[in-house]
Image (cartoon, rainbow, N blue to C red):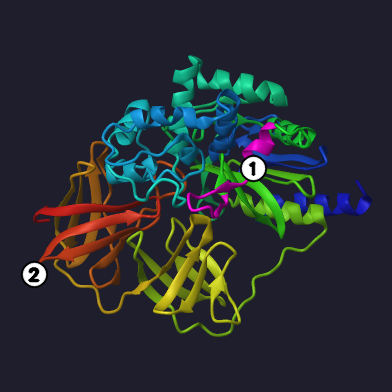
Amino acid sequence: MTKTLAARLEHALETLPRAYPGPGGAVAVLREGEVLARHAWGWANAERRIPFTPRTLFRMCSITKQFTCGVLLDAFPDPTVLDEDVRARLPLLEGPAPGALHLAHNQSGLRDYWAVAMLHGSPAEAPFGDAEAARVIGGTRRLHFAPGTRYSYVNQNFRILSDILQERTGRGFGELLRAGIFDRAGMEGALLAADTRAMPDGTEGYEGSLASGFRAAENRVLWTGDAGLGASLDDMIAWERHIDATREEEGSLYRRLSAPVRFADGRPAEYGFGLNRARALGRAASGHGGALRGWRSHRFHLPGERISVVVLFNHLADAQEAALDLLAAALGEDRPKPALAGTAPGWLGAFLEPESGLALRADFAEGRVRLRYGHSAEWLELRADGSADNGRTRLRPGEGGLWMDRPQENQSSCLRRLEGAAAGGLAGRYRCAELEAELLVTEAGGVPYGGFSGFLGQGRMELLEPVGPDVWALPCPRALDHTPPGDWTLAFRRDAAGRVAGVEVGCWLARRLPYARIGAG
């Protein structure tokens, strides 16, 4: 490592704790299998004063998914032999079932069970284990798109795969991880840490901020193949070194995990086998992030440059942004700054996306377009042709109006503009026969609120936000999983007399669920 590179990395490491403040963290940078940076700071448990070290166990959360797929490919080189096993776990499903590869590529069409749990009234800190997961998954009657046609992030895709692997092999999932990956890669401390209530070494995850203060996050979820991995920074360094050491082997595990994936129509897919295939600072990269309340992590690997970056935070700072900061230091480059525009485009406003049935809101702030459609806001830069994009989502004026392109989801659609004031008369009880769950809408002092209930409990009432005529947003700022579903779209339906007869409920993770009005609010 040159003195210049060492100085860049040292400066980046000194900057991270202030740029991404919280109780503690650990990061690593590798190039050609050599560790260029291995650094930890702060506290794994601030109350018990346990320091964060490179050997501290950490909840890797959704980074688990690539390891689940690694076990899958190791045990069943042709995962399609498990398609009937998938079908058996969806006994009520009407129509074709997704196959094992659809699950591994997040092309299943299933609604995410953490999102559906909120429709069943689950409080954010409620327990959610095997019984609850089995009921939500087994109750699936419809998909929100045909398998293989679209991409949608679905956690239980990987829980189903790990359950099938256990049943087919007669071995526990933790044992399969140890034999299939951990021992081969030298991940000595890694384990299946399914119970999110505590880590074996006392490490805590924290919610909050410098302004509000940090507090230990309460989690009572049981995770398996979707997010159950526990590992230290040193374990993840071993994984990255294993990737580099086996890069030339034709059948190496990571080469198979990161191989090209396509949708049913032949178009390339950016997600497959638990890995995102994207670009980082203009270079081809594969990787994944992880999040639970109190935990944020990110890792990616650049095969062309043979560089890997790992970031672990036991708080809610943006681990992906920190990873990009470290990558820029390793490459000797400055991160590009967003191109800010002086004036807002004329096509801003509120829309309905016709395929998903979800509300879309585009406004202008700080020289960029803010898009609210998925489970978090996106920022798009304006282009000379009048469009706006961020490399993943594009809004463009076209024939018939404003179009949205999301190639990673294999989706392009002309949006329906929502114009006019939101109407009243929404109060009532609404029931979803498919979920056997309810939505209550009240008008408390003339102000509309809504809340979900079902077999998991009674969710809190939230203030509804008007989007357009008979289209409202019900916010979901906290959920069982760290990343909440975001705003639920409530698209109310009226009868011939103008009375509200029902509502269609959906979010990016769980779309187009019909509710019928069954009584007064």
Whether residue 101 appears in magenta in the rendering, the answer is no
Split into 4 quadrants, where in the image is the C terminus? Answer: bottom left
Task: Identify the secondary structure beneath mark 2.
Answer: loop
Name the residue: 49% across, 32% down: 80
Nearer the camera: disc 1 or disc 2: 1
Find residue 54 and report its horizontal and vertical position in percent: 72, 33
Instruction: List the single residue furthest toward the left.
Output: 497
Is there any visible trace of residue 363 in the rendered image? yes
The reply, left or right, for residue 72 in relation to residue 432 is right
Q: Quadrant of residue 446?
A: bottom left
Secondary structure of the residue carrying tag 1 is loop
| Kind of residue at disc 1 | Ala
Q: Position of residue 213 (x, y in %)?
A: 52, 49
Residue nearest the viewer, comparing 284 with 455: 284
Residue type at mark 2 is: Ala
Residue at mark 1: 259
Above or below, 463 against 23 in this view is below
First to last magenta residue range: 252-270
Q: Quadrant of residue 18?
A: bottom right
Say which mark, if any, is on residue 496.
Answer: 2
Q: Is 276 situated above or below 412?
A: above
- Is there any visible trace of residue 47 in the rendered image? no
Do residues under tags 1 and 2 come within 8 Å of each other at their CB atoms? no
